[in-house]
Amino acid sequence: MHPAALFFKSLFDEIVTVSWPLFKLMVPIIVLVKVLEELGGIAIFGQWLGPLMALVGLPQEMGLVWAATIATNIYGGMIVLYSLGSDSPLTVAQVTVLSGLLLMAHGLPIEVRIAQLAGMRMRTAIVTRLLGAFVFAWLLFVFYHQTQTQQGPAHMVWQPDPIADGLDNWVWAQVKALGMIQLVIIVLLTFLKILRLIGVEKVIQWLLRPMLKLMGIGKEASTITLVGITLGLSFGGGLLIKEANAGHVSKQDVFTSLIFLGFCHSLIEDTLLVLLLGAHLWGILWFRLVFAFVFTWAVSYWLTKISPEFQQKYLLRP
């Protein structure tokens, strides 16, 4: 067979291998979340989260914003935030704290399931994301409160268009979103294959190696980590599951990589989204990177101190 034909056949096989498990996972969860939303489940979840908001200096109704974000994505939380309105606008510090919650714990029904299929216990993934998000937001709140910085009103420069009422409009919106994910997967895998052919992938791994090594992430997981940092767990999830289940990456490396990516994924798009809300760049980018690095390093160090039996029972999925 001609080398070009081999290249495209191999690429097509990779696209199918990555896309099929991912869409098989995402579609039922999207439908389930919609059903829960229609039954009022997300509103109830928001009421549960409301009292926690005071601990990070936010109005109680921001619990509904975080609940919508946890169940759907950052766009969903933004739409709820705009729909609430307020006579007293949030300060830059408050928007930054809220953005910390949104950045570190969003789209959990899909992202937690991806983490589970890649090798992490579901309960561990849920607790890590929610607890880490709250600790991150609390640290931001303490910093801004103690320094009394960024206390002016936040200026929101963009509003997302809400999905029109009706089941047909919702279905069409989901189809467009899934189509965009498929397009990104095709572009991503093509790009990675070209990088692999010309040797650039090895250079990227070499450049990332010192930082990843400090966090206990092996060199085999560097490409996966890079994909997650730039594109996010939803876009890179299929690739992550494929590499992990193929045995190319150890379970400990997958676990550590998932911890880091849980707090630091889709770094460009998500950061730009919350900046449009009026968040402070230092808090939602640089402090986020430092927090993700320190948290992952601590988890990696802890893994060396606990028994393999404990890891298998509570942390790693068989």
Image: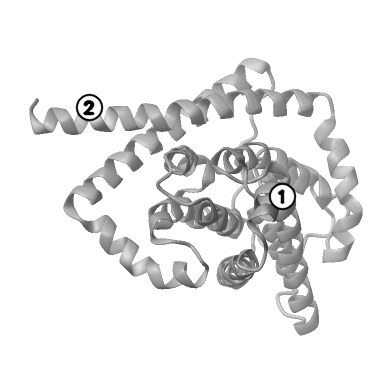
Marker count (numbered): 2
Residue 9, labelled with which disc?
2
Q: Which quadrant of the figure contains the N terminus?
A: top left
Task: Specify whether 41 is left or right of 108.
Answer: right
Observer able to see residue 67 = yes
Mark 1 crowdedness (10 Å alpha carbons): few <14, some 14-19, many ≥20: few
Circle 1 sits in a helix, a strand or a loop, which is it?
helix
Residue 314, labelled with which disc?
1
**Residue at 57% from the left image edge and 39% from the top image edge:** 114
> Badges 1 and 2: C-beta atoms under 8 Å apart?
no
Q: Position of residue 26 (x, y in %)?
A: 57, 29
In primary-sequence order, the first of circles 1 and 2 is: 2
Residue 129, labelled with which disc?
none
Q: Quadrant of residue 207?
A: bottom left
Q: Residue furthest bottom?
A: 147
Task: Specify whether 275 is left or right of 227.
Answer: right
**Residue at 60% from the left image edge and 67% from the top image edge:** 304
Q: Which quadrant of the figure contains the C terminus?
A: top right
Q: Amino acid at mark 1?
A: Tyr
Q: Amino acid at mark 2?
A: Lys
Front-most of 56 and 192? 192
Q: Position of residue 142 (x, y in %)?
A: 79, 75
Mark 2 crowdedness (10 Å alpha carbons): few <14, some 14-19, many ≥20: few
